[in-house]
Amino acid sequence: MSDERVARPRKQRNMVSSRVQQVPPSGIRKFFDLLASMEDVISLGVGEPDFVTPWRIREAAIYSIEKGDTMYTSNSGIPELRQAISRDLEKRYGVTYDPNKEILITVGVSEGLDLAMRAVLEPGEEVICPEPGYVAYSACPVLAGGVFVPVPTTIENNFKVRASDIESRVTHHTKAILLGYPNNPTGAVMPRSEMAEVAAVAERHDLLVISDEIYAQLVYGLEHTCVASLPGMKERTILLGGFSKAYAMTGWRIGYAAGNAEVIAAMTKIHQYTMLCVPTMSQMAALEALRAGDDAVLEMVEEYDHRRRVIVEGLNHIGLTCFEPRGAFYAFPSIKSTGLTSEKFAERLLFEEKVAVVPGSAFGQAGEGHVRCCYATSLTEIEEALGRIERFVGKLK
């Protein structure tokens, strides 16, 4: 009789990490996938400009390709672009960065956010962030081994976060405050006085601030407050910015991070192993945007402002209470009067009236009871969409 041991099959290991399993799929993506399979839909869902990238910016990229500038660049990005970003930030906000040590060119703000989280977080450290907020805000800290701590904001306070609400959530595990103003999805803007109160919390508790300012140039009737420009905040702020929204360059995938040299070096270390560098032609396009794109931005902002007024007035007329967004290109009306959840409202509106909006719940629990309507689409489509939404809401009464 053989005494050989019979090998028994092992239980299959879990092939996906627990961190990834903990993060749900993007609540936006579900509706984009549905939209792709339908015809004659008016989309108020996609958060990108309906303008084409201005010609001079496109031409700069085309010329770089024609010249054969198609090689790798420095991990940090081409020096001319970093220098231009440094000059732009000093001109706009009076904050000065060393382009050789304190600026990193990234593949959009999304990569910058991911790099920042991985560069600064130890396992279990907490990141405090207002909600509703961009879908990546809750995911990136978790994927970096950290803990996301939401701070609900409400329409009663125009979706601005209170410094006291942030401070009440600070623990000995807290590492950073993550801010996104002007806000996606609400369009909220923080005035300088209230942002200074948040900065004071960061100083009192020795916290970093990671500030996503991708919509900084899209404000209406007021000025944007750059967090790093507040007294004492440059050294503890990781400033994330980019070209996607203001310059209509979403598909170019180019942004930047600016901060103290130690943190930027850590982010660059991760970037060089994962992304290496941003495409050369995108960097050349961004450089031209900073050199000659401001007039085009002003024209787009003027048009967005007109659309903003039309959609807010229209939504309030329908009975979907909507506060006045002062930045970005989103309206965030309440749909609580309909008795539907935000996801059910968005789903039924899409199938019954062929208008695509994004459920507020995609942006955190504080977004439930609202939907995001992007007005970066033509005025004709906005007016038609408002008519369809009014018809849909009327059927629910």
Image (cartoon, grey):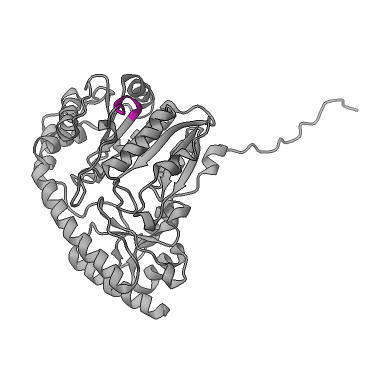
Q: Where 51 falls versus 73 (above or below)? A: below
Q: In this view, does 118 lie to the left or right of 40?
A: right
Q: Where 260 falls versus 321 (above or below)? A: above
* Residue 346 x, y percent position in the rendering: 40, 65
| Viewer can see residue 16 | no
Q: In this view, does 190 lie to the left or right of 15?
A: left
Q: Is residue 22 left or right of residue 386?
A: right
* Residue 64 x, y percent position in the rendering: 13, 32
Nearest the viewer among 334 and 375 is: 334
Q: Where 367 falls versus 128 (above or below)? A: below
Total marks shown come to 0
Instruction: Indicate the quadrant where residue 56 lies.
Output: top left
The segment highlighted magenta reads: 232-237
| Viewer can see residue 292 | yes
Image quarter where the N terminus lies is: top right
Q: Where 50 falls versus 57 (above or below)? A: below
Instruction: Indicate the quadrant where residue 67 lies.
Output: top left
* Residue 91 x, y percent position in the rendering: 14, 32
The reply to whether the magenta stretch includes residue 30 is no
The reply to whether the magenta stretch includes residue 233 is yes
Residue drawn 27% across and 19% down?
101
Residue drawn 71% across and 35% down?
10
Image quarter where the C terminus lies is: bottom left
Residue drawn 34% across and 53% down?
185
* Residue 171 x, y percent position in the rendering: 52, 33
Q: Is residue 125 left or right of residue 255?
A: right
